[in-house]
Image (cartoon, helix red, strand yellow):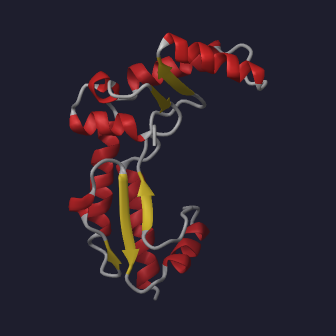
C-alpha cells in the first residue's frame, strides 16, 4: 500500500524520513492518491537501486523519453502531497452524509484518511450499484461498500452521490 504512505504522512504529521528509516527499500506510488498519470519510485541504497536497474534491464523493462513521466512525478510530489488533507476532509464529510441514510450503516469516527466504509443494512448493494450506474455513478457492490476520495472528488460530487443514494432508497 505504497499509495497510503503519503496519506499517513499528512494525517500523522510525521516526518517521512523517520517512517522509512527502518527499511532497506521502499516504494511510492505517484499515480493513486497523488494524481500522476503513471509512475512509482523505488527508494533504497545506491547499491540496491543499481541492482534493481540491472535486473529491470535484463528483463526488458525500461522506458524511453521518461522525462515527461519524471516531470509529472516531480509535480505531484511538490504540489499534491499536502492537498491529501482535502481528501481526508471530503472522506469525513462523505461518511457523515452516509450516516444520515437510515438504510446504511456508516461510522464517521472510523474514517482516518480518504477511505470510507458503509454497509447496506438490507443487503442491497448490488441493486444500489445498478441504480447508481444508470445515473453515471459507478461503484462496486460489496459488503461493506468502500468509498475512496481523491483529487477528482469534491463536496459537490459527494452531494450528488448522496442525493442519488437517497433517491434509490426513496423508490424502494
Asked where in the image residue 104 lies, by quadrant, the reply is: bottom left
Is residue 62 at all visible to an observer of this figure?
no
Residue 28 in the image: above or below residue 153 = above
Q: How many marks?
A: 0
- Position of residue 96 relative to residue 83, above or below, is below
Q: Is residue 132 left or right of residue 170?
A: right
User: Residue at coordinates 25% horizontally, 39% vertically from top-left?
Assistant: 11
Please state if 119 lies on the left or on the right of 64 as rendered: left
Residue 164 visible here: yes
Nearest the camera: 155 or 85? 85
Q: Where is residue 135? Give x, y as percent.
A: 57, 66
Image: 79 above or below 123: above
User: Residue at coordinates 29% horizontally, 33% vertically from top-left?
Assistant: 9
Q: Position of residue 18 (x, y in %)?
A: 27, 25
145 or 1, nearer to the observer:
1
Q: Residue at x 41, y 83 (%)?
A: 170
Report whether 49 appears left or right of 2.
right
**Displayed quadrant of residue 102:** bottom left
Q: Residue 25 versus residue 9: which sits nearer the camera? A: 25
Amino acid at each position: 500500500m505504497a499509495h497510503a504512505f503519503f496519506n499517513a504522512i499528512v494525517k500523522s504529521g510525521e516526518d517521512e524520513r523517520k517512517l522509512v528509516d527502518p527499511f532497506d527499500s521502499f516504494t511510492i506510488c505517484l499515480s493513486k492518491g497523488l494524481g500522476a498519470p503513471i509512475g512509482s519510485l523505488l527508494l533504497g541504497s545506491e547499491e540496491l537501486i543499481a541492482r534493481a536497474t540491472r535486473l529491470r534491464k535484463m528483463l526488458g523493462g525500461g522506458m524511453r523519453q521518461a522525462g515527461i513521466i519524471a516531470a509529472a512525478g516531480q509535480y505531484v510530489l511538490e504540489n499534491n502531497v499536502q492537498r491529501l488533507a482535502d481528501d481526508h476532509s471530503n472522506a469525513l464529510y462523505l461518511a457523515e452524509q452516509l450516516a444520515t441514510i437510515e438504510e446504511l450503516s456508516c461510522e464517521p469516527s472510523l474514517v482516518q484518511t480518504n477511505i470510507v466504509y458503509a454497509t447496506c443494512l438490507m443487503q442491497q448493494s448490488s441493486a444500489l450499484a445498478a441504480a447508481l450506474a444508470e445515473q453515471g455513478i459507478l461503484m462496486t457492490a460489496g459488503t461493506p461498500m468502500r468509498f475512496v476520495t481523491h483529487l477528482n472528488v469534491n463536496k459537490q460530487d459527494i452531494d450528488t452521490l448522496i442525493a442519488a443514494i437517497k433517491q434509490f432508497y426513496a423508490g424502494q
